[in-house]
Amino acid sequence: MKQKIGKTLFNHIGLKILSLVLAVLLWGIVMNLADYSMTKTIRNIDVTQTNGSAIENMGKVYNVQDGETVDIVVKGPRSVVDPLTAEDFTAVADLSELSLTNSVTIVVRAKDSQTASRIEINCVDNIMNLTIEDKISKELPIKAIANGDVAEGYAIGGISVTPNIIRISGPESIVNRVTEVRASVDARGVSANLKKTVTPLCINAYGESMADRPIEMSVSEVTVDMTVYPTKTVPLVLGSDGSPADGYSVVEINYNPQEVTIAASEEVLDKTNAIYINDISVEGLSENKEMNLAISDYLWKGVILADQNTEVAVNVVLEKQAEREIEVSAEDIAIMGMNVAYDYTLTTSPGFKLKLKGLQADIGDVEKSSLQLSVDATDLEVGEHIMRLTYAVPKKTVLTVLGKVTLTVSERQETTEEQQQQQQQQQDGNTPAVPGENNPG
């Protein structure tokens, strides 16, 4: 039986070996066809810059103009090439090999040595172009900025930053574009003092951030302190200073706004009930005057303006004074302080008048009775006396006496009891005049 099996296995041995060889060849052909050669484009491989100190040691700085990433075309077996991504390659630009045109060749390699041996790499553009500039430095103040509105009923009393000066360094063309360095904090809804550490930010002339630019700063963090005060709305009280031109009077002073919102500590707010502006000069004015005054110039120490109105608009209204004459007789003048032992005779000089000068609205309706004209005979002895006329006039009205008032005092003759009672009643009926702006007659 064994001999029969062995005979069968070794029958036609040549054909069987040939079949095996053909099978192996066929498998190789099939496998070769399945793992065919292919190409693949891989994009945006980050380029690493090396030996940048070679440029910096010359007091220069560089900026990549183009070539921060590189695209490649990879060729090789499908089984090797197909799974490859940008992460499987390194791209390096050696800045020590900078050309006269400020360009560097980018070298791309596969990270895995076995992969590298089975593929070909071709760069789409293997040149990195640089701009080379002088490195400069400059110092700038740091501006503290509060973003957003604090809580209702509160205002920012002050904001500061420490340190308040910073040195920035970098390419000349970039550093020269920095116009401001800001330190910003979020003030939205804040109702108490705030202290926060923030990163300063370089800003250009258009108010745009330059955070993505190669700028070195002497400090990476600063501290912002913000004081928050409660607010209060108080009236503005205005007053004039000086006198207008002769013959003119100030009719009124109009202004807007008439109240403003201020901020301060609770203690200071309790003591502040108004903002007084008392130095509006009307000296020598002969016509209306308009002006704008900075409200902050009139605030107490420790008080800040928390109002959108920073100025008060003032309009001083003038009016030319009018004149009016009133004829007066002795009968219009009361004698005060009479002694029952004397007789009194009051006379006025010929053409005796009173001249009023002031605003038409003030003097137009003045009557003799409203002037409360009187003379004071208290302690006068027998004889003839030139009297000082007493009167009451409206505010800002000037009264001039044109003429003289003479009071003659004489010994009283015997009178009946009835005459004495009449004189006493007459005296009791004379009430003192209410003094105004009095001028001597």
Image (spheres, grey):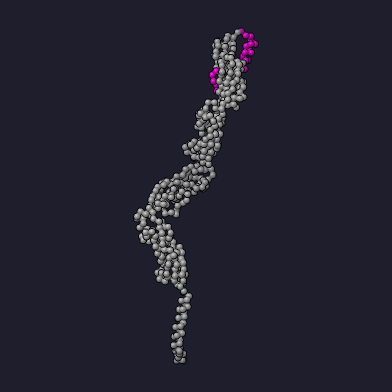
State whether residue 325 is above or below residue 221: above
Q: How many marks on residues?
A: 0
Q: x%, y% of residue 427?
A: 61, 15
Whether residue 384 is visible: yes
Q: Is residue 347 left or right of residue 91?
A: right
Q: Residue furthest right?
A: 418
Q: Residue furthest left?
A: 57
Q: Residue furthest top?
A: 414
State whether residue 169 is above or below residue 309: below
Q: Is residue 39 magenta?
A: no
Q: Residue at x 46, y 66 (%)?
A: 42
Q: x%, y% of residue 355?
A: 57, 21
Q: x%, y% of residue 391?
A: 57, 20
Q: Is residue 426 magenta?
A: yes
Q: Nearer the viewer, residue 260 or 216?
A: 216
State whether residue 428 is above or below residue 162: above
Q: Residue at x 43, y 49 (%)?
A: 178
Q: Residue at x 51, y 41 (%)?
A: 306
Q: State the quadrant of the C terminus.
A: top right
Res 88 quadrant in image: bottom left
Whether residue 79 is visible: no
Which segment did they paint magenta? 414-441
Res 77 quadrant in image: bottom left
Res 388 quadrant in image: top right
Q: Is residue 390 left or right of residue 97?
A: right
Q: x%, y% of residue 203?
A: 45, 50
